[in-house]
Image (cartoon, rainbow, N blue to C red):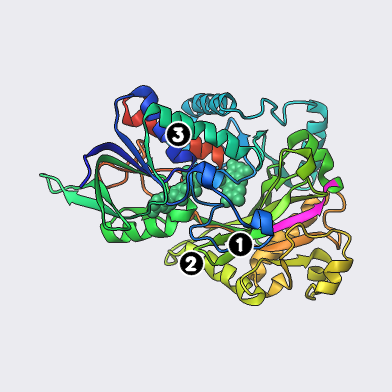
Amino acid sequence: MNAEYDLIIIGAGPSGIFTAYETKLNAPNTRVLMIEKGYAIENRRCPKRLTGKCANCNPCNITTGFSGSGSFSDGKLTINDHGEVGGELAQYIGLDQYRKILRYTDDLYVKFGTDQHLYGTEDEEALEDIRRKAFQANLKLIDSRVRHMGTDKAPEIYLHFQKELERMGVEMWFNTVVSDLIIENDTQNNKVATGVILQDGQRVKGKKIVAGIGREGSDWLNLMCKKYGIATRVGQIDIGCRVETDAAITAHIDSLLYEAKLVYYTKTFEDKVRTFCWNPRGEVTEEKYEGKLAVVNGHSYKSESLKTANTNFALLVSKHFTEPFNTPIEYGRYIAELGNMLSGYKVLVQRYGDLKRGRRTTTDRLRKNNIQPTLKDAVAGDLSLVLPYRLLLDVMEMLEALNHIMPGLAGDGTLLYGVEVKFYSNQLVVDKNFQTNINNLYALGDGAGLTRGLMQASMNGVCMGRILTGAW
Ligand SMILES: Cc1cc2nc3c(=O)[nH]c(=O)nc-3n(C[C@H](O)[C@H](O)[C@H](O)COP(=O)(O)OP(=O)(O)OC[C@H]3O[C@@H](n4cnc5c(N)ncnc54)[C@H](O)[C@@H]3O)c2cc1C
């Protein structure tokens, strides 16, 4: 048994990093241990970047290691003053605090090396024009600005964070999986978290336990919730496709905003569909869940030499399920499995023209297409055999609406990749201090279903660190 830590943080993603940073800043003598199943930042490598072939690393280097899913992400830091993008933090801390923490966190990212340039702050007239066209097509353009780290630069920036945490005295254990929690009863018979158990059976004691385990750890956290009666509520699931088009089609938006956050309520089902993770002149990527399930994502590089001729973004349908259904993660996985079944555990790609004509895309049709896929090993196929009718129609209706502000987007050559699914659906019930119904067990970030992006996950960590040290 190790000596007791004041704080154990499970997961070194942005939520965990900022918890550690803010804790040490406000209470330097706090004994903080951070446990991460992936590698330290300098050792994180995705073999696919060199070979073009996924090596099925377990754990996946894209989603695990210091800075979590943030390291190889596109590194778009979305700044929205109304708390409408990337999570529900504003509901927990109120808009005034939200705005203060947003400024503070953004300044920290700049201090640690993120570009000063903020997209969405220039040329108000051009922005107004996009907003008007969006309105005419029943789309809502969410007011937000973007600071872009870039997939190539984000690891450098997070390396500065890692070094700073080391300097501050945060103990970090990499390649270490937390496989269980230690939950005991206190003198009043209340359940209280007192430590964690590692994969090799080692028990580590901590006065407070923070779970910042991201989507990568959501299955494990679900198990913990069932085992220890940690309260959850059924969350939403976001599922859909990734769209890839010629960068000329989106150029006016890319240069002005970098990313357009657009929301649409579909004609037929009135479902909410939104654009997500916009990558100007970027690449579509494959992400592996549980070392096997291939789902689609995307990123873009900062350096001019690494940019492509295409822009990609996701179209995600947000589904809230009601009683008696309570397993939205399984629902999302089931649909992704269906796609994988047809493609041999690869991402599927289909031309929009083929989808409209009710036929599959073949390798030959793809070869002749005017837009070439940046995800080279995507398998040409038929998304209508994978996505339920309602979801597919939602995506198609959104694409047609977007065509009003980006003429040509709904053209035959536009590529749709599937399935893109966000496994953050089970929300933990936490109080305003992010404490669960188990004393001294806190949950935050994407894994707790509270956030859905780098900025809010990082901000959640800032709040956590301040709360734990009484600096709130
Ligand atoms: C490819 C990709 C691109 C993205 N691009 C963007 C973008 O441009 N902009 C944006 O805002 N967001 C983006 N995101 C989302 C963003 O990365 C996440 O919202 C953010 O990283 C969430 O932070 P987190 O701390 O909650 O979780 P994570 O970053 O997922 O970190 C959780 C960490 O916990 C570790 N962990 C889990 N379980 C255990 C366990 N049992 N034991 C030990 N360690 C464990 C994991 O290994 C992981 O490192 C992207 C995500 C991906 C995958």
Res 330 label:
2
Label 2 neighbourhood size at 10 Å, few (<14), some (14-19), many (20+)? few
Quick one: SS at disc 3?
Answer: helix
- Element type at mark 2: helix
Q: Main secondary structure of the magenta part?
A: strand
Viewer-proximal residue among 432 and 49: 49
Residue 72 part of the magenta-drawn span: no
Q: CA distance from mark 2 to mark 1?
A: 14 Å
Q: Secondary structure at mark 1?
A: strand
Residue linked to disc 1: 295
Q: Amino acid at mark 3?
A: Phe
Which residue was labeled with disc 3?
A: 18
Q: Amino acid at mark 1?
A: Val
| 93 or 55, nearer to the observer | 55
Residue 355 placement: quadrant: bottom right
Q: Is mark 2 within 8 Å of ligand 1?
A: no
Q: Is residue 426 visible?
A: no
